[in-house]
Image (spheres, rainbow, N blue to C red):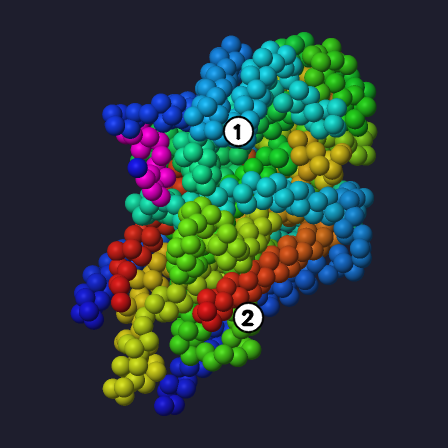
Amino acid sequence: MELGTTPLYLTNICKEIFKKENMEFKKILCYVSIIFSSIVAVIGFVSVVVSVYIGDIFVRILLVIIALLFSVLSYYSFVRLHKRKEMVGLLVFTVIVFLVAYCLPMFPPEYGLRQYDLDASILKFMMASVILVVIGMAGASFSMKPLYDFSSKSSEASAYYILIASIFLILYPLAIIIGNIISSGIGGISWEFLTQDVRRHGTQGGILPALIGSLLIMMGTALIALPLGIGSAIYLHEYAKKGVIVRVIRIAVDILQGTPSIVHGLFGLALFVPIFGISLLSGILIMGFLTLPIIIRASEEALKSVPQNLREGSYAVGATKWQTIRRVVLPPALPGIITGGVLGLGRAAGETAPIMFTAVVFMGAGVPTTIFNPIQALPYHLLELTKYIGAYPVEQNAWATAFLLLAIVLGINAMAIIIRERYRVEF
Amino acid sequence: MMTMIKEHNKKFGKAIVVLTVSIVLGAVFLSGCTDQETTTITIKGSSTVLPIAESCAEAFNAAHNDIKVTVAGGGSGLGIKSVATGEADIGDASREVKQSEIGEYGDIFIDHKVALDGVAVIVSKAIYDAGVTDITMDQLKGIYNGSISNWQDLGGPDEEIFVNEREEGSGTRDTFMDIVDLDETSADKANSANSQVKQAVSGSDVAIGYVGLGYISDETPALKIDGVYPSGATIKDESYPISRSLHMYTNGEPTDAVEEFLNFVMGSEGQAIVEEEGFISIL
Amino acid sequence: MLKDRIIQNIFFIVAAFSIFIIFFIFFFLFQEAFPAFQTMGWDIFGTNWNVAKGQYGIGAAVFGTLIVTAGAMIIAIPLGIMGAIFSSELAPLKIRVILKPLIELLAGIPSIVYGFIGITLLVGYLQPSFDMLSGYSLLTGSLILGVMALPIIVSMSDDAMKAVPRQLKEASLAVGATKWQTIKKVTIPTSISGISAAVILGIGRAVGETMAVSLVLGNMMKIPIPPWDMFETTGATVTSLIAHEMGEAAGLQINALFAGAVILFIVVAIMSISSNILQERIEKKFRGG
């Protein structure tokens, strides 16, 4: 029975256990050990996250069960599998777990790090929880070893287990952020919220001017960045010869892409604000420069994906370069370019630092009459509300603003991904 | 295959065109709603004056269709600088203009007192409930220069003190440091607005910080200093040691819209707002 | 033909515009920063930041940036590479199709939202959990930055590992290695340039991030004692310093803040260029065979 390369061991394990012909003691033992250890690890993790200590007794019981399971495993490895060295390894693990279970009550309620000049202590719940997580994960991955008779397959299985765990760890913050924002924020969204002006330091009323401002920034950014970006990409991919200048341009685009948003903001502060003041125009210009590399990158990728023979076919019938680009290369590349544009818009909607010094105020801007007026914007609004939490009762509006901002930005990004996938033409 | 592409792109192109047109129409429609000539008044400066400025601006904007008041924070230093350079029409400050500023920008500042205020020392509710309700000037100085670091020394629990101060450039900070007689502090956190001090203090069980009067609340109660509680009465008769006035400065005499707004703030409506925000009316 | 020439030149100018932007950025930043370098010389990296006395040593902020970035990388590099190994080598197609967009989603979350979550959830969680004086600390900043840098490292490392030619992997399996051994001994060493490029870009992101970090730090321009004490409330990064002080800065202070921005710009520029060079090297390797 080959578990193959699919890492869905847990579900497979459950299926396996209940297949009569596979009921072998070793397998049952290992599976039980894996499942139990995983549960212990999860308990530990949850305990850390909600800052709750499940109590000395429970922890000790869990640890003792693991130790028992492992003592059986190590006995089994020795007697049945005749693996001396590995048995010793498992035995050592067993002993360690027993010791920890025994010593647990002796742990101080907090282990002060202050003796090391660190301004913190590790509280007992944290100690116990981390121990549970570590022992649980170690136990689960060690349990894989006897399952595969300590072959190289078993190290593979252990490694896979850890890798799967890492994915959960990576997705966990995502779940926390999105989950909390949706649950706490959605309640604050209402028609009034979306259509009224900011009132009473943002505690009441709505965010309409911020929405409008963000929309204006997005539009203006598209106006600046799309022509410049698509044009640059066309030059870089269609016209450019390998030369120094092209290399320099590419380096410049790279640097531009990596430039921190606050540096862009300061640039705007130094160059545009003295000329245009704090205005929509300054914000659009800066945001345009910020999104430019994104559009250049995406457009270049799109152009690259158009196969060369299309172009050659066009030249063969006598079209000029520009005619070729316009009629043969651009149309199929359009979805990719649009994807880039949409991603750039998403960025423009969510950035705070570039507009902080160059375009926005917290209230009073309303709908700007000219592009030389300041505006309000969603991310800046959220920033100010965040600063007010604890000082004014803005919580509900703050969560609602976060929800709206997240929904808009993620929605735009999702749209870009959908466009990319749906209109992907396979050559 | 080319036809497939063309079909895809036709649908695509249509979608894009529809989206763009609707956005443009929407923007035109919205901007068409505010067609009249509006004068904008820009206010920048102290985060202490900010709630007053914001609430007055809100009321004023609602009553005047042709004047738009925008308000931003940034600190008293920024407010004075902005009004001197013309970036703002009104500069909020929770302190008076310094001699050095007059030296740098000239004697151009016209002072409009809009409220009376005190710098209140707030503590976490847990500390207040534990019995620490009173503090002496010396103890305050000790806390901020680091010589007193445990609440025990003030009759509170055995916990380290989480000291909050304001950023440099804050009028509140200048007033506080001046009156408590400090040059530097050994504080733990620098906050860039009154509201952030309050945020830090309310989020902790062992914190102390200083804020304008309007930021005192049940979650962040104020201490008596040398037996005097910061209130309207004790500030007016100056028995509360850290009192000050709140100013809106203009560059030269204010005209038209700016003058109208300032009269509003210093008049009965504005002063009612001042009191609502927790500060003390000058009337 | 002439029309074509003209069009080509137009496109060239458009493309060259990017160079101009970079040049302008550097020029204006440096112009504003120069007085600070001039007046203070190397003192600008000192740790005396006292606006009242006119001292503008941003050393404490640079230190803060270093610590916070290091902490973020300790989280992001192991987790990121492990996640990339999973998504590129182990995940069945059905899972990969969900996973990749999810990671991209994580990358798309605006930084102010991270800052917001930091204030509402993280600060309140960390303080009691580690018995810290307050939840505002360099540790908090590191945690948030670690999460922010993760998606970059995961997706770029994933691309790098996916780009390893199938023949290499199949050859390894053919001689009897397990999939994990193949990953360890073949895939990772071959894609190490791409992974390094990913890590470098992740560092660049962490160094330049402002909104997420500035809200959760203590923002005192002091180096903690001892320096590695991330649990202390004090600490600032170059980005948070600029974000907090620029609003009300004047005179030499502005120049000092711009000097900080120049440093950020140069550091991130170097990182972007190195990352690009590494990626070019990979392309050459696999194209040349």
Q: Is any atom of residue A157 visible in this view? A: yes
- Residue A407, position in %: x, y? 36, 42
The magenta span reads A2-16
Crowd class of label 1 (few under 14; some 14 to 19; many from 20; radius 10 Å): few
* Quarter that holds the C terminus of chain A: bottom left
Residue type (three-letter) at the residue carrying disc 1: Arg
- Tell whether position B102 is magenta: no
Residue at the spot of label 2: C19
Residue type (three-letter) at the residue carrying disc 2: Ile
Of circles 2 and 1, the one toward us is 1
Give the residue drawn at x 33%, y 38%. A3
- Residue B98, position in %: x, y? 76, 42
Q: Which mark is residue C16?
A: none
- Residue C48, position in %: x, y? 79, 44
How far separated are the C-alphas under marks 2 and 1? 67 Å
Q: Quadrant of residue C69?
A: top right
Q: Does residue C215 appear to the left or right of B176 in the view shown? A: left
Q: Does residue A150 appear to the left or right of C25 in the view shown? A: left
Q: Chain of mark 1?
A: A
Give the residue drawn at x 67%, y 25%. A120
Residue at the spot of label 1: A84
Q: Does residue C189 appear to the left or right of A328 in the view shown? A: right
